[in-house]
Image: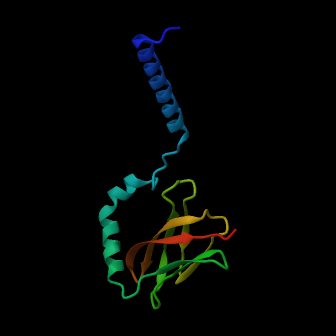
Amino acid sequence: MKFNWGTGIALAYGIFALSMVGVVFASRQHDPGLVQKNYYDLDLNYQARMDKKQNASTLANLPVARFNTPDKTISVQFPSGMNVSGGSAKFYRSATTRDDFSVKIENTNAIEIPAANLASGRWRVELDWEADGKGYFWETTVNVMKSH
């Protein structure tokens, strides 16, 4: 078989077509999971969230969220003297939405979340709570590190 321009162009188009099929196949295998599943609702309630963030920024002490390595728990401590009446703590990772979860906050100034089954890495924590008749919203990150 003689290699000429026609053969070269046909090989180039064939390789290009096969590589595009490969890219399409590989992209179909990837889950592009959104950071938040309910981003439309978040957009509609943007001003309410901004008001809660403003309330949190006026606090003398912000909540503290940390991973406790020996216990394999995530602890969230609200400022002392604050009467937390309810709310939620959302935990999510930007890598996937399958690991996201929420914890309800009820009449407590501290919560402990078991983290033994959580994937290692950076977790975003969104605290949305009510105390003394005001709503608060605060975000932070927690690094879950598991020793093998």
Q: Nearer the viewer, residue 131 or 53?
A: 53
Q: Position of residue 8 (x, y in %)?
A: 43, 16
Picture residue at 36% right of the left edge, 88% below the top: 60
Task: Please identify the residue farthest to the right as the structure is shown.
Answer: 148
Left or right for 67, reference 82: right
Whether residue 108 can be seen here: no
Q: Quadrant of residue 35?
A: bottom left
**Residue 97 in view in this figure:** yes
| Residue 12 x/y as whole percent | 44, 21
- Occupied quadrant, residue 56: bottom left
Residue at image location 49% in from the left, 29% down from the top = 19
Q: Height in image: 14 above or below 49? A: above
Where residue 148 sits in the image (x, y, percent)? 70, 68
User: Looking at this view, is 95 or 22 the one in front?
Assistant: 22
The residue lying at 47 percent from left, 90 percent from top is 80
State the colouring used for the structure image. rainbow
Residue 99, horizontal then vertical, whole percent: 57, 58
Callout count: 0
